[in-house]
Image (tube, helix red, strand yellow):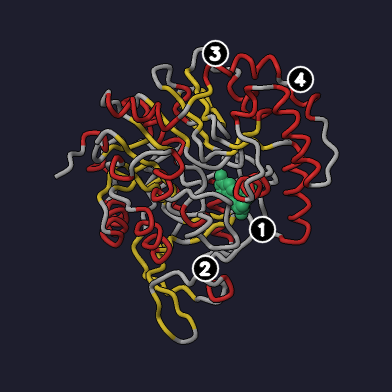
Amino acid sequence: MKRIAIVGLQWGDEGKGKMTDVLANKADIIVRYQGGDNAGHTVKFDTYTYDLHILPSGVIHPHVTSILGPGMVINLETFFHEKKPFLNASIKVSNRAHLILPFHKTLDAKKEETQHIGTTKKGIGPTYSDKINRQGLRVASLLNKTRFIDEANALASLHHIEFDAKQYYETYEKEIKALIPNIIDVSKFIDEAVNKDQHILFEGAQGVMLDISHGTYPYVTSSSPSVSGIPAQVGMAPWLLEGALGIVKAYSTRVGEGPFPTEIHDTLAHNIREVAHEYGVTTGRPRRIGYLDLVSLKHAVRVSGITHIAVTLLDVISEMDVIQVCTQYQLDGQSIDEVPAHIEDLSRVKPVYEALPSFKDDISKITTYAHLPKAAKDYVEYIAEALGVDIAYVAVGPKREQTIEVKNIWEVTGD
Ligand code: IMP
């Protein structure tokens, strides 16, 4: 396969950054296709740890061209700060991506006072709102200082917020000028790369259950992490995508508010949080912990057309005496195997669990699938079979080297 998507199948924080980093060795281009600096992707190798929020996780590989796609919302402050250590990296930005301006963060914080979604307060929702309302500023506006100032001041007035667009532009003028040669038409760039038969990875942020259409609305982000959103957001034909690697954490986590049917409330949640350091990379908030939820995972696989999975944080399962997996929901006395569309119904579902044997071994140094304990393999295979997908990778720790390759997804052929 030459064009592959990487997408989180839960509520984000599944380990997409690490898997993008692993697949980057073969990639020519990595495109972040949605979201902004609400994301937090941790990549660890040797003694280095990189927390990336806006740059694609392949940026640490010098041979990769990193692209911030048209479906993204970009905070210049984060962007310029984050790209500083990557002096020799090739980083390109879509002329159609939208700009998060400082007042979008103010608007986000203000809305949170009444709406309580538990957003990252990075201004994501208000920036996408301006985009859909046909009044946002795109990266192309940066190409002309006067035009940017007029447009940004007009937008601030629409929101009844004081804003000095000239001062803002001048704060970043040097960096903007340096960026201009790398502001591109991403659709055209990808078209040319496809014609050159290059390997392209499409890297999602957040997860399918936070998708604006298919997630647990309204407790979602304001973009579409689902694979089905990629062609529209990047500007390419849907049939050019050849495969989709869904990242499944071996248990569930969620940050922010919203229903979480399999949430664990006892000390097990605390133990998992501490062992796996389940705290938000962007906000530092403790993540809520839950058992694996096959109902929502099947939904995520279906809406995203997942072909393969990577099961991450499998080592953490040794904290559980028994592995509980939610196979169905009960709602008003009925068994259901789909995710209710209305949030009030979703908040009332009761999970039905199947218990599987756990394992207590330390698997963090195991490097081949065959050497994993039987209960660990049985669990991974149980997940894959339930979801009707192939296993490509299993991660047994946070480092790049702690990823077991079952099948190299780049080498999968179409038959
Ligand atoms: P927003 O994307 O900041 O508007 O936040 C909307 C919801 O998505 C909140 O519940 C956030 O906690 C959640 N969210 C946003 N980005 C991430 C992420 O990278 N990982 C996990 N949750 C996220």
Of circles 4 and 3, the one toward us is 4
| Label 1 near ligand 1 (CB < 8 Å) | yes
Measured along the vertical axis of the image, is residue 259 above or below residue 17?
A: below
The foreground one among 256 and 232 is 232
Amino acid residing under circle 3: Leu
Position of residue 10 measured from the top left corner of the image (x, y, whole percent): 46, 54
**Residue marked by disc 3:** 87
| Label 4 near ligand 1 (CB < 8 Å) | no
Which numbered disc, 2 or 3, marks the residue that appears first in the sequence? 3
Of circles 2 and 3, the one toward us is 3
Position of residue 354 measured from the top left corner of the image (x, y, whole percent): 37, 70
The answer for how far apart the CA atoms under marks 4 and 3 are is 22 Å
**Residue marked by disc 1:** 117
Count residues near mark 4 (Cα–Cα under 10 Å), then give few for <14, some for 14-19, many for 20+: few
Measured along the vertical axis of the image, is residue 243 above or below residue 197?
A: below
Which numbered disc, 1 or 3, marks the residue that appears first in the sequence? 3
Measured along the vertical axis of the image, is residue 245 above or below residue 259?
A: above
The answer for how far apart the CA atoms under marks 1 and 2 are is 17 Å
Count residues near mark 2 (Cα–Cα under 10 Å), then give few for <14, some for 14-19, many for 20+: some
Say whether marks 1 and 2 touch (CB < 8 Å).
Answer: no
Which numbered disc, 1 or 4, marks the residue that appears first in the sequence? 1
The answer for how far apart the CA atoms under marks 2 and 4 are is 48 Å
Which numbered disc, 4 or 3, marks the residue that appears first in the sequence? 3
Amino acid residing under circle 2: Pro
The answer for how far apart the CA atoms under marks 1 and 4 are is 34 Å
**Residue marked by disc 4:** 170
Of circles 1 and 4, the one toward us is 4
- Mark 2 lies on a secondary structure that is loop
Say whether marks 2 and 4 touch (CB < 8 Å).
Answer: no
Q: In which quarter of the image is residue 194?
A: top left
Position of residue 43 measured from the top left corner of the image (x, y, whole percent): 49, 31
